[in-house]
Image (cartoon, helix red, strand yellow):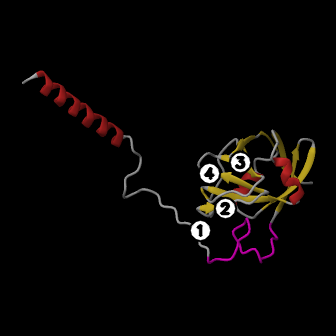
Amino acid sequence: MPRSALRTCARAVAAVALLLAVTACSTTTPDTAPTVSPPSNDSPRQSASGRPATEQENSTMHLRLTIGGHTVDATLNDSATARDFAALLPLTLDLDDFQGTERVADLPRKLSTDGAPESSVPKAGDLAFYAPWGNLALFYRDGHPSPGLVIFGHLTDQDDIARLANADRVRIQPAT
């Protein structure tokens, strides 16, 4: 067999081996790939707890955030994620900016997402958990729909939202 034919055959074998190695590393198959449904536009606007915004919120927990020496009040909704977050308090976290819309911080552990919607659209002032990365997100601007984002609270005063944009550290504790 000529050398050029051997080289071509060797390249083909290497390409097939590479293809098999790459597909063997895949964790999902087309039959089991997760699907994400877009949020329905025909349902009424819901509060951070997932209930219609017209319902009265009566199962909230109040928080106190300290940002740059200023006290900022927030409330948690009545969700498994919010209850799990409250169990971690008090927390002092270092914040980083993400996409010019939110400040993010690593949490000590992932939070429960039981009963949470598949996707949420964050608004300025929302406190959220991003399940894929396991971090806290504090939104200072409205965001985009994001699968895996669980909104579990909100700042009480809209005037305090601007403080988040430049915050490097936050202390979060139950309000007394």
Amino acid at dot 4:
Ala
Q: How crowded is mark 2: few (under 14 residues within 10 Å), some or many (20 or more)?
A: some
Q: Which of marks 3 and 1 is nearer the N terminus?
A: 1
Q: Distance between the residues labelled 2 and 4?
A: 14 Å
Residue 18 to residue 71: above or below: above
State the mark number for residue 39.
1
State the mark number for residue 136.
3
Q: Which of marks 4 and 3 is nearer the N terminus?
A: 4
Image point (73%, 65%), residue name: 48
Q: Do the residues labelled 1 and 2 touch (CB within 8 Å)?
A: yes
Q: Position of residue 120 (x, y in %)?
A: 64, 61
Q: Which of marks 4 and 1 is nearer the N terminus?
A: 1
Image point (35%, 39%), residue name: 22
Q: Where is residue 15 in the image (x, y as percent from the top left)?
A: 26, 34
State the mark number for residue 121.
2
Q: Tell me if residue 48 is in the magenta stretch.
A: yes
User: Which element type, helix, strand or loop, lies under badge 3?
Assistant: strand
Q: Residues within 10 Å of mark 3 (few under 14, many from 20)?
A: many
Q: Distance between the residues labelled 4 and 1?
A: 18 Å
Q: Name the residue under label 4.
A: 131
